Amino acid sequence: MLTRHEQWEAKLHHSIEVHKAKPFAWGEHDCALSVCNHVQAMTGIDLAAACRGQYQSEDAALAAMGRIRRDATTLEHVVEQLAAQHGIPEIKPLHAQRGDVVLLDNPSPSTGLNRQALGIVHLNGRHVVVTGP
């Protein structure tokens, strides 16, 4: 079970500030690694340890997801696996609070394909911080 540090709000704020100006880059600063960086700041646990530094493209990211969960074909599958491993309960979207991880639908403006993205509820409780457009 993940437990947040006593000063998790300050740690999350610092993590968001450090990462907010970084451009999107697969395997360096994508939505999954960004969220995992924020979770690590709040808890000390690196949820991305199994795939950090192992991919630099979208296709390689999909392969890395398969190493976390053998039947993974979506980001949601990986999130489910990591949540189960770490005792993180699923919550309803309208109950998400500051520092909670959220899985978003992310339709591509150019192709119309729906993809998924991870974000984290900002400390203001009204916005979700995501990496990329």
Image (tube, rainbow, N blue to C red):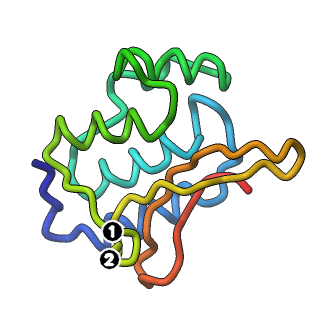
Q: Which residue is mark 1?
A: 92
Q: Residues within 10 Å of mark 2 (few under 14, many from 20)?
A: few
| Residue 73 x %, y % | 51, 25
| Residue 75 x %, y % | 49, 37
Q: Residue at x 54, y 57 (%)?
A: 104
| Residue 121 x %, y % | 43, 70
Depth check, front residue: 81 or 30: 81
Q: Tell me the tag on residue 128.
A: none
Q: Cβ–Cβ below 8 Å for labels 1 and 2?
A: yes
| Occupied quadrant, residue 11 | bottom left
Q: Residue at x 45, y 23 (%)?
A: 65
Q: Which residue is mark 2?
A: 95
Residue at mark 1 to residue at mark 2: CA–CA distance: 5 Å
| Residue 12 x %, y % | 36, 65
Judging from the image, what secondary structure is the residue with disc 1 in?
A: loop
The three-letter amino acid code for the residue at tag 1 is Lys
Judging from the image, what secondary structure is the residue with disc 2 in?
A: helix
